[in-house]
Structures are given as C-alpha cells and as structure tokens.
Amino acid sequence: MVHFVGAGPGGPDLITLRGAELLKQADCVVYAGSLVNPALLGFVREGVPVYNSAHMTLEQVLEVLEQTERAGGNTVRLHTGDPCLYGAVREQMDQLDRRGIPWDVTPGVSSFCGAAAAAGAEYTLPWVSQSVIITRMAGRTPVPEGESIASLAQHGCTMVVFLSAGMLEGLSTELLKGAYTPDTPAALVYKATWPEEKVVRCTVGTLAQAGRDHHISKTALVLVGDFLSHQYQRSLLYHPGFSTEYRTGDGSAEPGGAL
Ligand code: SAH
C-alpha cells in the first residue's frame, strides 16, 4: 500500500512518531525533494529505493508506486508539511483508487504552524482575529476567481500566504486593496524550523523591501495581520469572571457582567 506522510516543516524531529515508523518500515520512498529535509531519509532502511519527486512527473511517481505494490511492498510518499495543503496529493489518491492500490494519510506539522512557532505568535487573538485565511498569490499556477488576495483581504483577519515570497511587491499591492493598511504588521518567515530559519518583521507596506533586504524570495511564508502587534485582550476562557464546563467563575466577564 501507499502511505502519504507529512514530513513536517523542516526540522527532522518534527515528523510524527507514526510517520517515522512508516519510513523505517518502507520498501520504497518517494519524497518531495524541494522542501523535505533529506535528514529524514536517515530513517529509511539500507538498500530501499528512494526517489526525489522534484524530478518526476505524476505519471513517473505512479509508476514507482505501482511497481512497489506489484512486488508486495509499501511505499511512503513523503510530502512537506502536511499533505493536505498544496501537496498535489488528491490526484495521486484518485489514480491509486483507479488502480485498486490502497493508501492512507499520516498528517504532519504544516509550515504555517512552524512559522507561528518561529514568530512566537498566536494566529487567533481575542478581539483581534478569530479566523485564519490560508492562501497564495496567483502565479504560474492560477487561483480561482473569487479568491483573489484583494477580495480575501477585505476581512482584515490573520492571513498566511504560501508560495508567494517571489511576488512580494504584487502581494503588498493586493493586500492594500483590502482592509489592511501600510502599517498593518506582517512577517516573512523563511525556512521555519530549519537551522537557517529567519523571521523578518515588517509591515504590509514594507514587505517587498524586507524581502530584498534579507534576500528572501522563496521557501517562506508571509504572515499578515494585527495578531503580530502587541494589542489584544486576555481570553475569556481563562478569565476568573468567566465560567466554563470545567470551572466556575464569578460572572464578571459574562455578558451583562461587571466587565
Ligand atoms: N504542504 C506544505 C506546503 C507545500 S507548498 C505545508 O503544509 O507546509 C510549499 C510552500 O510552503 C513554500 O513555497 C513556502 O511558502 C511554504 N513552506 C514550506 N515549508 C516552509 C518552511 N519551513 N518555512 C516557511 N515556508 C515554508
């Protein structure tokens, strides 16, 4: 069978225990070489064929998965971060179904989580933002109409922009068509959780300059929103005036309470 495994954002110890175990038992590994840390291949048994899918087409990947299946082996298809985001996994799953080859998925730590960790940030701050938009700029790969950055930016919530570090000028222009201002905080997070990780704090207005100054044009996420500022209010969840299923508060922070 084929195991789709999330490799995590970079740090080799950020793969899940299940993912590492599957790698140890694999009879064949196909990994997304552009972003998966090659250190993870250290889990693979000696003599097991390892393919870098960066140099392969979908057809060639499927051929390898099919061959291993025919020989009665298990393949680990290792994707960067979590396979569910920009992983081109669905087309593989559907083709495997067509061939009657079983598969399953082991999640991974997505780079958007790695980036928050690197920035020491929480995407959902009380009264600041309670939603996270994960998106990308249209580039050589299009984005459906209705999902333009300018339209998504109207919400003014937390935004995590993938695959767009090479288009910072355009990204900044699009963001400014929405609810963000040139002063809205932003950050470029380069290679989160890798040894060469960099967090560059800037604003929506200075994104492109920040990219130029720090030579960041790929393998980065752009974080946008007021969650990066220092203004927020404490949560109700842990407020002494707020009751939850597990704790009784004094009511002062409940609707109609003293606060
Ligand atoms: N499935 C992956 C995303 C793959 S798309 C995930 O869950 O993270 C590839 C894009 O992800 C890159 O262009 C970059 O925008 C982002 N990315 C992947 N790893 C990253 C990392 N360690 N730090 C910052 N951005 C990263």
Image: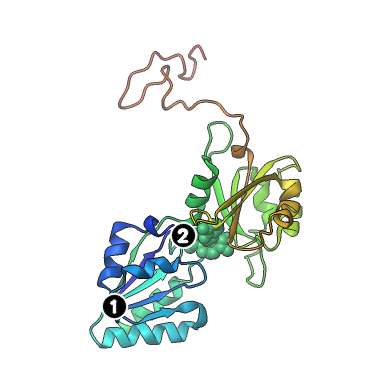
The answer to whether 227 is drawn above or below residue 244 in the figure is below
In-front residue for pair 39/150:
39
Q: What is the total number of numbered labels drawn onto the structure image?
A: 2
Q: Residue at x 63, y 42 (%)?
A: 225
The image's colouring method is: rainbow
Mark 1, Cα crowd under 10 Å, few <14 / some 14-19 / many 20+, is: few
- Place of residue 71 in the rendered image (x, y in percent of width and height, measured from the top left): 25, 87
- Place of residue 107 in the rendered image (x, y in percent of width and height, measured from the top left): 37, 59
Q: Earlier in the sequence, mark 1 or mark 2?
A: 2
Q: Residue at x 25, y 71 (%)?
A: 25
Q: Residue furthest left?
A: 72
Q: Which mark is residue 12?
A: none
Q: Residue at x 57, y 38 (%)?
A: 129
- Place of residue 87 in the rendered image (x, y in percent of width and height, measured from the top left): 48, 68
Image quarter of residue 29: bottom left
Give the residue number, with chain letter if any, for mark 1: 46
Q: Residue at x 35, y 69 (%)?
A: 42
Cβ of mark 1 under 8 A from ligand 1: no
In-front residue for pair 13/222:
13
- Place of residue 156 in the rendered image (x, y in percent of width and height, measured from the top left): 65, 43
Cβ of mark 2 under 8 A from ligand 1: yes
Left or right: residue 171 versus residue 96 is right
Q: Which mark is residue 10?
A: 2
The answer to whether 241 is drawn above or below residue 18 in the figure is above
Mark 1: secondary structure? loop
Left or right: residue 72 versus residue 231 is left
**Marks 1 and 2, how far apart at CA:** 23 Å
Residue type, numbered disc 2:
Gly
Residue type, numbered disc 1:
Glu
Mark 1 vs mark 2, foreground winner is 1
Quadrant location, the N terminus? bottom left
Mark 2: secondary structure? loop
